[in-house]
């Protein structure tokens, strides 16, 4: 159970919100690392990252559908309200119809993302490194005292 929300079940020690935050942080880390001069060493590293991101994109449609179904169930039971002063104040049906449309659009985008990432990954599956051993270059680029890579 979550420490701040004991009502939320956990999977692998995290609740659904914590998993979403971890996914965002993982993509943030990928964005940082792939921008570093030596963030990836071989074409197989790019293949591995793209293939795993394709897998993430493929699973997003299921998550969007399940979230939408849960919201619909809560709404049908009368358990969804919308705060005053907001665009859908007092109109949870309108709000959830908009959410459903947005999630449908997101699911279509996720499918498109999956297709592109999968195609890129499959294309790279036969790529290989033909240059000098990059590990030697990385070691040679390290500062003798700190071990940090020199840009």
Image: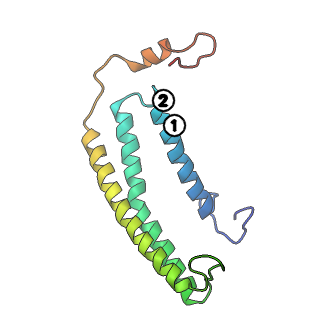
Q: How crowded is mark 1: few (under 14 residues within 10 Å), some or many (20 or more)?
A: few
Helix, strand or loop under label 1: helix
Q: Residues within 10 Å of mark 2 (few under 14, many from 20)?
A: few
Circle 2 residue:
36
Q: Where is residue 134 in the image (x, y as percent from the top left)?
A: 40, 19
Name the residue furthest right: 4
Question: Where the N terminus falls, by quadrant?
Answer: bottom right
Q: Which mark is residue 65?
A: none
Q: Position of residue 49 (x, y in %)?
A: 41, 42
Quarter of the view holding residue 85 = bottom right
Q: Which residue is drawn at 56% across and 58% down?
A: 20
Looking at the image, residue 18 lies above or below residue 119: below
Q: Residue at x 47, y 67 (%)?
A: 63
Quarter of the view holding residue 42 = top left
Give the colour scheme shown: rainbow
Q: Where is residue 145 in the image (x, y as percent from the top left)?
A: 63, 11
Name the residue furthest bottom: 77
Specify whether residue 125 is in view.
no
Whether tag 1 and tag 2 are in contact, CB under 8 A, the answer is yes
Q: Residue 32 carries which label?
A: 1
Looking at the image, residue 115 lies above or below residue 107: above
Closer to the camera, 44 or 148?
148
Looking at the image, residue 93 lies above or below residue 104: below
Closer to the camera, 76 or 125?
76
C-alpha distance separating marks 1 and 2: 7 Å
Q: Residue at x 49, y 15 (%)?
A: 139
Looking at the image, residue 56 lies above or below residue 78: above
Helix, strand or loop under label 2: loop
């Amino acid at each position: 159970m979550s420490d701040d929300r004991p009502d939320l079940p956990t999977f692998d020690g995290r609740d659904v919100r914590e998993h979403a935050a971890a996914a965002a942080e993982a993509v943030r880390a990928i964005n940082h690392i792939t921008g570093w001069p030596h963030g990836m060493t071989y074409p197989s590293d790019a293949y591995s990252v793209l293939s795993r991101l394709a897998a993430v994109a493929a699973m997003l449609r299921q998550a969007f559908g399940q979230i939408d179904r849960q919201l619909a169930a809560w709404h049908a039971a009368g358990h969804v309200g919308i705060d005053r002063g907001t665009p859908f104040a007092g109109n949870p049906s309108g709000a959830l119809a908009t959410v459903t449309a947005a999630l449908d659009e997101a699911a279509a985008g996720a499918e498109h993302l999956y297709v592109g990432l999968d195609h890129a990954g499959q294309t790279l599956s036969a790529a290989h490194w033909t240059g000098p051993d990059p590990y030697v270059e990385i070691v040679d680029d390290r500062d003798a005292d700190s071990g940090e890579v020199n840009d």
